[in-house]
Image (cartoon, grey):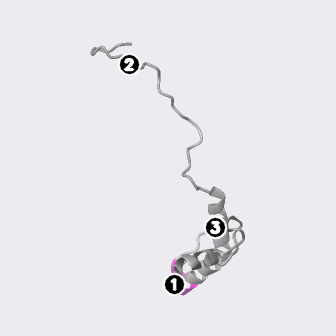
Amino acid sequence: MRDDTGLERNTTPAAISCGVPIRPVGFKPMAKENSSGLLRQYFPKGTDLGVYSQEDLDYVAWEMNDRPRKRLDYLKPNEMIEPLLLR
């Protein structure tokens, strides 16, 4: 079909995608669920974190980063980041 300028126009309807949303690269829903489950070992759901000291929260963060991870070939995140920080 031609418009008023004499140029041809594409009259094919655009494809509309309906379905599963595209997730960002590297998005791992299971990793998030696993982290939530690990946090629940220390803080039950609905816990007010304001009652804990920063020292308590830092300890939990250290504990979680001191666990071996399959995706890191069973190394701990603390072991992976240490060489990067010592550069």
The residue under label 2 is: 9
Indicate left or right for 56 with 3 as reference: right
**Magenta span:** 50-56
Closest to the observer, 44 or 63: 63
In this view, the mark in front (3 or 2) = 2
- Evaluate if marks 1 and 3 touch, with contact meaning CB atoms under 8 Å apart: no
Residue 51: say if magenta: yes
Ranked by sequence position, the earlier of labels 3 and 2 is 2
Observer-nearest of 38 and 51: 38
- Residue 41 position by quadrant: bottom right
62 in relation to 19, above or below: below
Find disc 3 in the rendering and name its residue: 35
Q: Element under label 1?
A: helix
Can you give x and y, in whole percent of width and height, for residue 77 in the image? 62, 74
**Which circle's residue, 2 or 1, is located before the other in the chain?**
2
**Quarter occupied by residue 46:** bottom right
Q: CA distance from mark 1 to mark 3?
A: 19 Å
Q: In the image, is residue 52 above or below residue 30?
A: below
Which residue is farthest front? Answer: 87
- Label ID, residue 8: none
Three-letter amino acid code at the position of disc 3: Ser
Q: CA separation, marks 2 and 1?
A: 63 Å
Q: Which mark is residue 54?
A: 1
